[in-house]
Image (spheres, coloured by chain):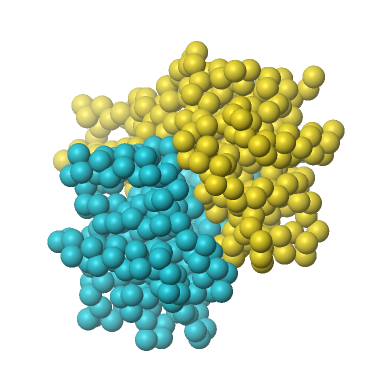
Amino acid sequence: MKQLLIISGKGGTGKTTVAGAFIKLLQARAYADCDVDAPNLHLIVNHSGKAEKKEYHGLPKAHIAANLCIKCGLCEQNCRFDAIHHGQSFYIDDYACEGCGVCQYVCPASAISLREKTAGELMLYKNNSVFSTAQLKMGNGTSGMLVSEVKKQMKDAAAKDVTIAIIDGSPGIGCPVIASLSGVDLALIVTEPSISGISDLIRMIKTARQLGTAIAVCINKYDTNLKNTNTIEKYCSDNKIAFVGKIPYDKNAITAINDGKSIVDVDCPAANAIKKVFNNTLIIKEL
Amino acid sequence: MASKKIAILSGKGGTGKTLISVNLAAAEGNSYYVDCDVEEPNGHLFFKPQIIKKKNIFVKIPNINNTLCNGCRDCVNFCKFNALAYGKQVIVFEEVCHSCGGCMLVCPTQAITEKDKLIGVIEEGISGKVNTITGIMNTGEVSGVPIIKELLSIIKNAIGLIFIDCPPGSACVVMESVKDADYCILVTEPSVFGAHNLDMVYQLVSLFGKKCGVVLNKCEAGYNPSEDFCTKNNIEILAKIPFDKNLCSLNSNGKVAVRENYVNKDLFYSLLNKVKENIK
């Protein structure tokens, strides 16, 4: 099974719209939403039936047993994450704790243990197709680990003869994006012709190259700034990056989302353009 | 005058956080603009600040002295992040190291010290009367949190209004940026995606007991699920910014709308006044 990841660097360029369209056009039998701290793909793809749900723990977090604590303060001094504070007693800030275990190690009174805490939830829908998604709990870290779990549960559940899986990524270039990029065959970067879009695209390309992931680029809302669109096309050709097409700004995109549909369910200019992008992407040799 | 920190966040990416932050800071004039979206910082593209100070940001990673190492593997066994392995000697996987310092503590032969690893830079600059502070994470790095922490410590003694442009999402990086805020502006767009992610960040700011209001960006005639959400949850709508080709074009060319001849720039001034009213 080959894996196609849709990412963008900058947020709001249309990753999920493109992913939703690709899933429909391919009649994909395996797909996943790796944007675990703001997932949206479930709002526009079919996922009838009940999800298999699984708690996600991430790393265990420190816990101080008040009755054993001798208030020596060694834990607070040695914590690098500002996760231990004290008033009358010493306590852990769960949001700041990364579960490194240093406090447990330095505690002379064995008052500190590491305990599992729920950090999110994994969901898996299995019908004719497999849809894997998750939601990270508010303010939690370790989203990269959750992303890896989302991909793993998709791979494990997908039928053996599935040829291509579609993965919707998250914005940025950090932890969840790096986890999303790992092991995929091609990353399609959806960008937009703004100064911000260009800057973020270049940082995204650099990140993907550092990880050795094959990439292709398409421009969404290309007609909102033709000059910047040209700049992006030229950048891609100068740097030998596969350029797979341009999608016009189209009000139907928002209407489709709000109706819970994929853009290719509507007969409109953006849908026609995405179909071309889709065909151009599928012939890239890595897929 | 005391300082007030205003965090601008959104959940969903691309709703207009930077547009709002940049224009509010420019409308206020003598103020601070802090870009906490260290993975994809964009505010500097609008302000084009004159850089007056650069500070490299480092994290600590283990440095193994192989002549002192006795091969006990205590460090490898201790590391919860699997950042260490033992082959013929200890191998450090720098990119997954969380800089907790545990390996150094557990080593019985003091074979581990720490060295600095560069993960990014903070640029302080000035654009008109606005002080700009931008965090830029190096590509290939996993976490920008140490850079955000440093950004927030730089503004600790600042005076006046401080506008904090947050990263998208609702994970640790966002929480870090919001923790010290006096007020939060939630920016959203008229789609189910926008409303769904607005719900998430609204929960996040509520969890921290922050006062907040919503800016509805890219408004057009017709159904607005985000506006619906605000009405249902009794959240103040601070401004409605229409979808407007002129604003779109200024924005995509990296121009600050309130500094240009933009017909609707009053929108940003009245938003600023509302926010000031709310933080009094």
Residue sitting at 73 percent across and 22 percent down?
B160
Pick out the residue farthest to the top.
B52
Q: How many marks?
A: 0
Residue B160 visible in this rendered orientation of the protein: yes
Chain letter, colour yellow in render: B
Q: Colour of chain A?
A: cyan
Horizontal side of residue B56 vs B133, given as left or right: left
- The relative height of residue A235 versus residue A118 in the rendered view (above or below) is above
Horizontal side of residue B239 vs B86, given as left or right: right
- The residue nearer to you, when weighing A6 against A113, is A6
Q: Position of residue B72 (x, y in %)?
A: 28, 41
Quadrant hosting residue A166: bottom left
Q: Position of residue B130 (x, y in %)?
A: 62, 21
Residue sitting at 33 percent across and 79 percent down?
A27
| Quadrant assignment for the C terminus of chain A | bottom left
Q: Position of residue A45 (x, y in %)?
A: 46, 75
Horizontal side of residue A275 vs B39, given as left or right: left
Quadrant hosting residue A91: top right
Residue sitting at 55 percent across and 47 percent down?
B245
| Quadrant assignment for the N terminus of chain A | bottom left
Q: Position of residue A178 (x, y in %)?
A: 35, 49
